[in-house]
Every structure is written in C-alpha cells, then in structure tokens.
Image (cartoon, grey):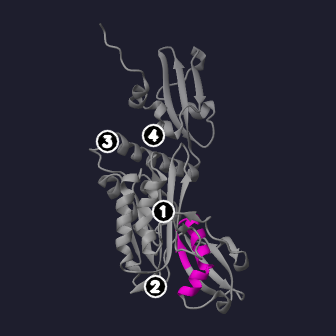
Amino acid sequence: MKMDSKYRVVLLDRDGYEIGERSAESLKEASSEMAYLLSDLYARAGETTHETMGTYKAEVRNSSGECVADQLFEDRKPATSPQRIK
Amino acid sequence: MSFDHSLTTTVRLKADTTEDQVADAVWPLAEYFGLKRDGVLGNHNHSRIIFEIEPAGEGRKNLYIYTCGDVTDGYRDSIDKTALKLAPLADEAASLTLKNFDTADLENAIEHFRFGPSEELIETLARKEAGMVALKSLENCLGEAEMKAVKAILAHPIGDPASDPIGNALSLRRAAAELLTLAQSIDGLAPYSVTHRHEYGASTYLAWAREVPNEDEAEAILHCEYEPDRGEELAIGTDFSIDELTGVSAQFRLPDRAQKKSPIRSKS
C-alpha cells in the first residue's frame, strides 16, 4: 500500500527487489518499522521465513527516495532494549 | 478480520508521571498481545509492543509507543482504553496513530485516537492534523515558496482567541516572524534603524535593505531634509530584529515584562 508519509521503510532481497514496505512519520518510528520488517515475527505473519524470502537488508528512504538509514539482515537487532512491564 | 498494522505515538508526559502510571496506561495494548504482567517488551522476536520513556530536556519526559503485526478490529478497543488512561498523564494533546497496511481504502488507512489534558488542546491538534492533510493535497498546485508560507502559518495553530488572547495572538506573531524570515530569504531585505538627529531632537525610521545602508541611501527615507552643515547626524544600526518587530521576543513585550517584575507594594 502507498501512504503519503515522510519516510518509506523497505525490505530488500539480494537482487535489490522490494519484498516488504512500511511507512513512518519520524526516524524513530522508521527505526521501529525497520526492526519489525527484519524480525522473525514479520516473516511468520506472512507464513514464511526470511531465508525463503531471501531478505538481505532494510532501508529507510526519505520523500526524495534517498536512503537515510539501513540495516543488514545479518546485523539485525531489536529497536530497543528489552524492557520489563510491571 | 485481521490486518497488518502499526500503532505509534510520542507524547510529552507531565513532570510528575511515574513509570507505574505509564505501565498501567500501556497495559491494555500489552494485554491484547497476550503479555502477562512482568512480561518483557521491546524485542520484536518476542513481542509486538515496545514503549520507551525518554528524557525530553528541562526535566520533561516523552513516552514513545509502537506496536506492529496482525491485529483484529477489536484492537481499537484496547487503543481507546490506552488513550483514555494516557489523557491525564499527557502534558499536551497527542494521538495514537493506527495504520492499516492491508486495506485498499486509503481514505481510512490511518486512524487517529487523540487524547490530551483538555478538549480544547485535542481540538487544536485535530485541526492541525487536518491542516497537514490538506497541505499535502496543496503540494500539487502550489509552488515551493507558497508551500513554505502556508506551512509557516500552520506550524502555529490558533485556538479560541477568547480563552487565551495573548497565547493565540503570539501564535500569529510567530507565524508573521516566520513569514518575514522567509521573505528575507527570497529578497535579502533585512531591517535597519535610521536615526536622524536634528535641532529639535531625533527621529527614528525603519529601513529594509540588503546590506547596511550608506548615508545617501538612508537620507532617501527621511521625511525631512538632512542638513549635516547644521550639525545634524544620521545613525544607522541593526537595532531591530524580526522577532522584536513582530512582538515575538518577550524582552520587548511590555505585558510580559510587567509580569516578571516583583509584586507591587501597596502604600501604607
């Protein structure tokens, strides 16, 4: 789906094809979306795995299409440190 | 029916808000995702909700909430409950923004669950958000400079003038200052003071120029003849900033200065 947002977060395979997409209004939100796209949870929601999808990296792109942040699948990490809810 | 979603908000909290209060407010969302009390948040491989309390300067704190993944329509009830619990903790109006990534209905793909310390602040936020939506549609028919001008006005929302005349007028003044700064970036004209000292005293004029005016240029704006032979003088300065001219600077607003003064002593 296309949303008129400040940032586009895309999931790319090794050939540079977009295999997932989210939108975000801030870099913080974009960072959360990037972590989600790279997570096993995202792949499981689509009843697949990142290995099957061929996930290589995720990119945050601004409204001009420039990449302003990225993360490789092999370097993926959660958006924040785990936190305990009391 | 389930849909892939994201939910986000960043809200400034009241200074005395405790972590327990925040956890309680976030709880309806956490509970929806099957978390038990004392569960771990913040890692997408284990849960679909993260929240962070971040310092926002001057002892303030911001709360950031993010959830993602498949949810059903019933999730809106949990969002409503969280919005209700966040309202008394919020120092300003904010909204929990729900995006549905699976719908083809783009009109309704984004929903805002607004909350805040007062109805008026929530309404002002709603107007601002509606303005931003309208702004995006204007981008196709307005030029870059026009868009910047419209954004300068929308960046300073105005509430009910009767309830806060000074605050709302200040918003307009700030918009005026931004418009003048924008004008300056286009034509390069900045404000200069020209003081004409003559035998009857001194007269001060305001001149807009690209650089500090010389004596000949400054003379052109005087209302009377400049006669240096009779001991008259012209002083050209950068005494006025745009903030001062538009009344944004509190230092030059007499009502603000009066408030800062110590209480008036009554005569005995």
Label 2 – label 4 distance at C-alpha: 48 Å
Query: Which residue position is annotated with label 1?
Result: B147
Residue B102's disc is: 2
Residue A33: x percent and y percent? 57, 73
Residue at label 3? Answer: B165
x and y percentages locating residue B240 in the rendered image: 53, 34
Q: Chain of mark 2?
A: B
| Precedes in sequence: disc 3 or disc 4 | 3
Chain at numbered mark 4: B
Residue under label 4, please give it. Answer: B246
Q: Amino acid at mark 4?
A: Thr
Question: Can the viewer see residue B127 in this picture?
Answer: no
Magenta highlight range: A22-45
Please report contact status of discs 3 and 4: CB closer than 8 Å, yes or no: no
Q: Earlier in the sequence, mark 2 or mark 3?
A: 2
C-alpha span from label 2 to label 3: 45 Å
Report if residue B206 is visible in the image: yes
Question: Separation of disc 2 and disc 1 at Cα?
Answer: 32 Å
CA gap, disc 3 and disc 4? 16 Å
Choose between B217 and B117: the one closer to the eye.
B117
| Nearest to N terminus: mark 4 or mark 1 | 1
Kindly state the secondary structure of the residue where label 4 is placed: helix
Q: Is residue B68 left or right of residue B43?
A: left
- The residue under label 3 is which amino acid type? Pro
Discs 2, 3: same chain = yes
Question: What amino acid is at disc 2?
Answer: Asp
Bin the neighbour count of mark 4 within 10 Å (Cα to Cα): few under 14, some 14-19, many 20 and up.
some
Same chain check for tags 2 and 4: yes
Where disc 2 sits, the SS reads loop
